[in-house]
Image (tube, rainbow, N blue to C red):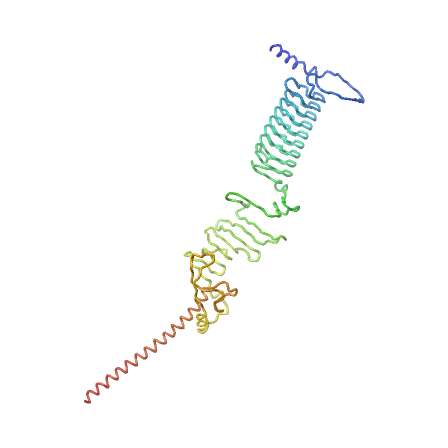
Amino acid sequence: MRIQVLFIFFVLSNYNSISQQNHLDVEGHTKIRGNIDINHAFDTTSVYIGRNAGVNNIAFLGADLNTFVGSNSGNKNLQGLNNSFFGATAGYFNLSGSRNSFFGSYAGYGNTMGSQNSFFGSLAGYENVTGTNNSFFGKSAGFENTTGSDNSFFGLEAGYYNAMGTRNTFIGKEAGSASGIDSLDRSIAIGHKAKVACSHCAVIGGTEDESVNVGIGTTTPFKRLDVIGEMIIRDSSKIATFQSANANSFIEIETNGGTTGATVGYFDDSSDKYFFIDTPEGGFGELVVLANGNVGIGKIDPGHPIEMASGAHVTAGGAWTNASSRVLKENICVLTVEEAISTIAELNPVKFNYKTQKDEEYIGFIAEDVPDLVATQDRKSLSPMDIAAVLSKVVQNQQLKLGQQDAEIMKIKKEMEELKSLLKEVMVLHVHEN
């Protein structure tokens, strides 16, 4: 055992001088026919080309099957195997990292034990130490990565500031984590200077002047997200959140030509909070829902549970109240007794149930069968107020007739009393005469 240790010590002490001896010194043009082996005396499985390339490589410690091309490439390698370093000082500090591919000057420069990395581009993966399974493509891509693993960075300085982050994908010039953030996990940034600041997040495009419009199914996206085709959003409960930069937010629904068809939004300030739906033709406040639950249709400040622009509303007690102000009406004329009586005579009360509610019986009228005076234009609905007005006129007329009949009865009663009094007087006279 002591002899073996002394031998290893001898090799390590003299390997540098042995490997630097010139066995072939050619000045001028050289033509070689046949095979050529370029390796160290103690490693016949690796290829080293360039001044001090793989100079410390020890084959019997397991450092074999390496290819180092370029001055100082793989300079410190001792036990790393199956590595390919191409470029000046590529993989310089690699000690035991294996199965790495570094292409470009200073690519993987600081790597010591990181394995199965692919760094392509000058300074790509420059500070990587133990990070594994990384793919960095582009000058200075993954430059500050030290222990981060399973990352894929593509583009000039892509993932530059990532140090410990894992399983990230950054694509585009300077795409990567936001300033001061170096340990994201499963994040994605795609696009020129695209930045992401949270783990398990995906960002497309940069911010402000670097921002882009994203199109799905279109080559000319006009907004931040332009989708042609149907979308499905799924979740077990809440499917989406729409958030504005200020207290008031809205969504515009446009036609294909870009004309606004409807606006849906939420208004919030110190005094009012409400949800609304508008159309260009209807103006603001076509449908409003206040924070207290009041609903306005054509009315921005409904004072009842449901209130129409006309003034019609549902009371808090649940009763429907029609709008009936004189200021809302025109062509006002008296309903004649004859019209009312004729209409009442033609009304045909029936019992029925609605097809959608078979277990509930109702009493009323059939809209298609009522007289014209109380019918609607489409003859599909009825207004209770119309029928109530006709009934009121008929009752008024009956009350008038009853009053007249009462007067006639009183007159007859008075005449009968007068006749009774006169008869009594006649009978008294008759008695006196006898």
Front residue of 394 and 342 = 342
Above or below — where is 321 with respect to 292? Answer: below
Residue 296, x across and y down, in percent: 49, 56
- Residue 224 in the image: x percent, y percent? 61, 45
x and y percentages locating residue 204 in the rendered image:
61, 40
Residue 147 sits in which quadrant?
Answer: top right
Q: Residue at x 60, y 52 (%)?
A: 254
Question: In this view of the protein, which residue sits in the foreground, 147 or 152?
Answer: 152
Q: Is residue 393 left or right of residue 283?
A: left
Image coords of residue 164 (percent x, y):
58, 30
In the image, residue 46 above or below residue 5: below
Of the 4 image quadrants, the one containing the N terminus is top right
Residue 67, compared with residue 370, is above or below; it is above
Judged left or right of residue 85, residue 311 is left
Asked if 298 appears above or below 176 in the picture, the reply is below
Left or right position of 394 against 156? left
Judging depth in this view, the residue of 219 and 373 nearest the camera is 373
The C terminus, quarter of image: bottom left
Taking the view exactly as shown, the residue that stands out farthest to the bottom is 433
